[in-house]
Amino acid sequence: MPKTAKKRRKKKKKGETPVTGGAGLIRFFEDETPGIKVGPTIVVVFAAILLIVVIIAHLDILPF
C-alpha cells in the first residue's frame, strides 16, 4: 500500500486578517447608482464599431 502525504497546516499569526475574496465587490456593484444604464451587449457593439472605424481609418479608405 502506498504512503500518503500528510498535509501541513499553516499556523495563523496573531493580528492576521483573512482574505475576503470578491463577495464585497459583488455587493458593491449590485447597488443602484445614478447615471446612464448601459448593458454589456451595447458596450461590445460600440467597441466593435470603434475597432472597425479605426482599422478603416488606418487603411485611408475614409476621407477623415
Image (spheres, rainbow, N blue to C red):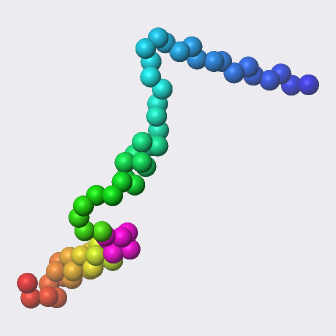
Tell me if residue 25 comes above or below residue 3 in the rendering: below
Residue 6: give x, y in percent of width and height.
73, 19
The image position of residue 39, as x and y in percent, is 36, 70
Vertical relation: 38 (above or below) 18: below
User: In x, y percent, where is residue 56?
Assistant: 21, 82
Q: Residue 5 at x, y = what percent?
A: 75, 22
Report the quarter where the C terminus lies: bottom left
The stretch in magenta equals: 38-43
Which residue is rendered at x = 49% and y = 12% of the image? Answer: 13
What secondary structure prevails in the magenta region? Answer: helix
Q: Is residue 42 magenta?
A: yes
**Is 56 displayed left or right of 6 in the figure?**
left
Residue 38 shows in the view: yes
Please tell me which residue lies in front, 22 or 57.
Answer: 22
| Residue at figure coordinates x 33%, y 58% from the top left | 32
> Residue at horizontal 91%, vertical 25%?
1
Q: Is residue 12 above or below residue 29?
A: above
Who's the residue at 44% across and 22% down the image?
17
Tell which of 1 and 17 is nearer to you. 17
Res. 44 visible in picture: no
Magenta residue check for 62:
no
39 or 2: nearer the eye? 39
Q: Residue furthest right?
A: 1
